[in-house]
Image: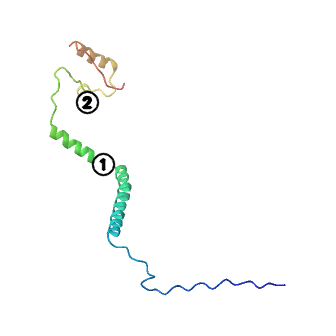
Amino acid sequence: MFKKKKSPPPAAAPAPESEDNLPKQKSGRFSKLRAILLNRSFLIVTVTLLVPLLAALGVFQTLEYSVSNQFFQLRGPIPHSEDIIVVAIDDESFQQTGLQWPWPRDYIAKIVAGISAGKPKAISIDAFF
């Protein structure tokens, strides 16, 4: 009626540890090469993660501005053409006129009329009204 279940065969006993059964340590060129590649891989991953973080913090922008400033100082001023005149509206202009921005359009028109009296080839205005 009831059948007796067969028990699984006994597991093989682990082999005693001897010099023949131990994993062999790799030595020589390949272990040195593997160490070099692991070090380089770690360096590449670190740089790959660090560069975007530093860029987000603005470190590279600050460095770029500093280097750019040094180049401009080394270069010195560039001689400009005597044919071009820039009329700038700056803080001193506001103090002299007593006006605030935006200046009235008729005041800007008077400035343009004064410039036109000199018969320039072109007049360019770069302002928001």
Residue at 35 percent across and 49 percent down: it is 55
* Residue to which mark 1 is pinned: 60
Which residue ends up furthest to the front in the rendered image? 20
| Mark number displayed over residue 51 | none
Picture coordinates of residue 54, whole percent (x, y) = 34, 52
Position of residue 88 relative to residue 54, above or below, is above
Left or right of residue 25, residue 3 in this image:
right
* Residue to which mark 2 is pinned: 90
Distance between the alpha carbons at the discs numbered 1 and 2: 31 Å
Residue at 36 percent across and 66 percent down: it is 34
Q: Residues within 10 Å of mark 2 (few under 14, many from 20)?
A: few
Viewer-nearest residue: 95 or 109:
109
Mark before the other along the chain sequence, 1 or 2: 1
Indicate the quadrant where residue 43 lies.
Answer: bottom left
Viewer-nearest residue: 52 or 90:
52
The secondary element bearing badge 1 is classed as helix
Position of residue 2 relative to residue 113, above or below, is below
